[in-house]
Image: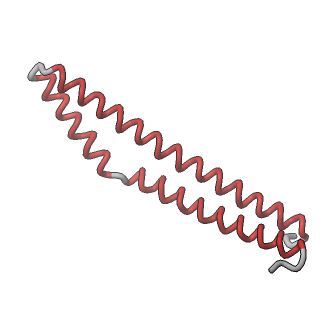
Amino acid sequence: MFETAFDIQITMAIGLFALGLIVMAISIFILSRQALGSEIKTIANQTTKLAEKGITENIAGLVGNASALINALHDLSKTNTGIGVFLVFFGIALVTTAYFISSNLGVTP
């Protein structure tokens, strides 16, 4: 399949570059979906209304559960954002590695 070491290295560079672009596209999708996620905003608004009702009617359990739900939504938001940012950096690392492999071959200027 590969006749020379040059063929192997150029295939690695192309593969890493393509994989890096795919990972960055996925990370942008994750981050944009997180920013546009109206479902989480709706749940947070309804939970806030529920907590206010619990306070006015003096129901302690309802307020505690609403608070736990808001904290869980906040943690979910942080987790998705962290995954998206990690994937951006991982994609950049893959593209940079592909560049250095190809620059050692004399393909790039």
Q: Quadrant of residue 16?
A: bottom right
Q: Residue at x 23, y 34 (%)?
A: 48
Q: Which one is nearer the viewer's eye here, 25 or 36? A: 25
Residue sitting at the far front? 1
Q: Is residue 69 above or below residue 99?
A: above
The answer to whether 32 appears left or right of 27 in the picture is: left
Q: Quadrant of residue 92?
A: bottom right
Q: Position of residue 93 (x, y in %)?
A: 71, 54
Q: Which one is nearer the viewer's eye here, 42 or 86? A: 86
Residue sitting at the far left? 57
Q: Residue at x 71, y 69 (%)?
A: 15
Q: How is the image coloured?
A: secondary structure
Q: Residue at x 17, y 19 (%)?
A: 60
Q: Position of residue 25 (x, y in %)?
A: 55, 63
The answer to whether 58 appears left or right of 94 in the picture is: left
Q: Position of residue 42 (x, y in %)?
A: 25, 46
Q: Is residue 46 above or below residue 6?
A: above
Q: Position of residue 29 (x, y in %)?
A: 48, 59
Q: Residue at x 83, y 78 (%)?
A: 2
Q: Is residue 61 above or below residue 107?
A: above
The answer to whether 34 appears left or right of 91 in the picture is: left
Q: Quadrant of the N terminus?
A: bottom right
Q: Which one is nearer the viewer's eye here, 6 or 47? A: 6
Q: Quadrant of the C terminus?
A: bottom right
The answer to whether 7 appears left or right of 79 in the picture is: right
Q: Quadrant of residue 9?
A: bottom right
How many numbered markers are drawn? 0
